[in-house]
Amino acid sequence: MNTEALVIMISSQVVITAFTVYFFYKVFSSPIKKD
Amino acid sequence: MSKQNEQWGSRVGLILAMAGNAVGLGNFLRFPVQALNNGGGAFMIPYLVCFVLMGIPLLWIEWSMGRFGGKFGHHSTPFILDSMDKRRFWKYFGVFGIFTNVAVAAYYCYIESWTMSYVVHSVAGTFDRKPMTWVAGFFNNYLDIFTSTTGIPFEAVIFYLLCLGLNTFILSRGLSGVEKVAKIGMPLLILFGAFLAVRGLTLGTSGASAEYPNASAVDGLNYLWTPQYGKLTDLKVWLSAAGQIFFTLSVGMGTVHCYAAYLKANDDVALNGISAGFTNEFVEVILGGAIVIPIAAGYLGLDWVKENAGFGMAFQTMPFLFEKWGPILSALAGVFWFGLLFFAGITSSLAMGTPLMGFLQDEFSVSRNKSAMAFGLLVLVMGLPTVLLFTKSATGGVSLIAFEEYDYWAGTVSLVVFAMAETILFSWIFGIKKGWAEINTGADLKVHPVFKYIIGYVTPVMLIIVFFGALITPEANDWGAAWQSFTSGGGWPLDNGSVLSMITMTGLNEKLAAATDPATIETLKTAKLYTYIARFLLIGLFAGISWMVFIAYKKRQRAELKTA
């Protein structure tokens, strides 16, 4: 792949994966609310 | 009015169900084609900007509205919207949140049934060593229900009924059924997608053949991801990105409100909403961008992809390409590909069933089983025309007329109208101050204050632009040329795909006026008749739901008078 395409593809993938993992980490680490 | 006691079993189940609602066939088939046609890698800039300015805000708006309505015992949009403002007309805007789901489910279940059938055919080896034209022709014959290539009469109808029956059965199990499917389906979808994405990313030039000597998956990836920065000044690219974000997140449908209505008053919506949104983006950008285009370019070359990239590739091309991987791997790839499309489909179609069920249970005390049956029957009545009303061209191509009409009016225009209306209601009428408090109630995520202004001003304005962009789309989507024509007194040249032209069937009428061959004229006349039938059914559905909302409103009034 050419460098420009590779940079855009990998940076998009890294940004989206990082945010997804971060938010799921927050979901799992948030305290469970009591009724 | 009855009180429902259903609740989500777990937080992860809810997020996966919401993500499953959003993840659909478009993630794998629409996104890469949109990126390909709108600047390649540069498309990611408007795409991500629209995700932040429109997608995430809309998710938070819909989650908050749903939970707000749920506090008053409302589980469908007519009375969720009604609870947010004194003006009585909002509940009729809320009709869109039931209407859209029934109409879209009518054809969506049909696509879902194709994936079921293609899983069976992949295992049975139907496509073994068959040429590409045969595989493409198989799909057309499949849609022409009167031609059976497999020996099963009316195969498409049988699979459609099976698929609808399965949806109805799961819906009759309530939220726990939906949650179970999401917990099984979403991880499997990601697993299947990851397998195919790895193949797509590592195929290289190994798929080149004597017929396609220049075929290269790398060319496909380069074309998909190389940024054409010049395209960023083109309004069409921004409208396409906004449209893609809008449709991929399944906002403007009423399903998010319905699922969120089953939350408790202090449950989080901010973190749950954004987690579901990013799960959808993960599937779309990382998996969706690495399967269809590189695999097709890897075997057929970039030129073929540029000419043929579209929805049909999923069924007409991919089974042929998988055959290159040998008998075992091709069967496995077929199961994975159509399996992931099936899971993407069923997690969305189940979401489409819940608003009508919630409405019937809330307002008419219909039991869960009976409301699921009512949904199944209504979808069947609306859906059979999508299976039966088709025309066939001289070359064998099949046009599903009712399917296309439903997709345009219910699956595209209604979403934009409803999303625009609900955003105006939430941000400007209910008020951003109260809306912001709703988003932050019970939040496990500190939402940055800038979103208060984005939700209050930017998102509604963007949706108004998207709506008018669809209403008056210029010829060939060329806004620059249309503006020049307008300012020089030449009028605004409307595209045949614009809402205004679609209302008057301009494209079809033009084709009919230009046709000279009697067979073509007959086909076009049939298409026009089927279009009228489909529109009649859609209007009838909307009117019927509106009438039920009116009856429910009158019932509520009588109940309030009694208690007063």
Image (cartoon, coloured by chain):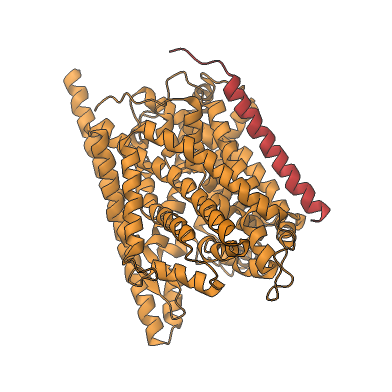
Chain colours: A red, B orange
Residue B483 at what x, y percent from top left?
63, 62
Q: Residue furthest top?
A: A34
Residue A13 at what x, y percent from top left?
70, 43
* In this rendering, position of residue B479 left or right of residue B347: right
Nearer to us in this view, B59 or B564:
B59
The residue lying at 73 percent from left, 73 percent from top is B213
Q: Residue furthest right?
A: A3
Q: Is residue B456 above or below residue B325?
A: above
Q: Is residue B218 above or below residue B5?
A: below
Nearer to us in this view, B187 or B104:
B187
Q: Is residue B327 above or below residue B209?
A: above
Can residue B322 be seen? Answer: yes
Name the quarter where the C terminus of chain B is drawn.
top left
Q: Residue furthest front?
A: B328
Residue B389 at what x, y percent from top left?
33, 67
Q: Is residue B313 above or below residue B197?
A: below
Can residue B428 be seen? Answer: no
Nearer to us in this view, B314 or B434:
B314
Residue B266 at what x, y percent from top left?
46, 18
Q: Residue furthest bottom?
A: B517
Q: How many marks?
A: 0
The residue lying at 62 percent from left, 43 percent from top is B50
Name the quarter where the N terminus of chain B is drawn.
top left
* In this rendering, position of residue B202 left or right of residue B537: right
The residue lying at 33 percent from left, 52 percent from top is B162
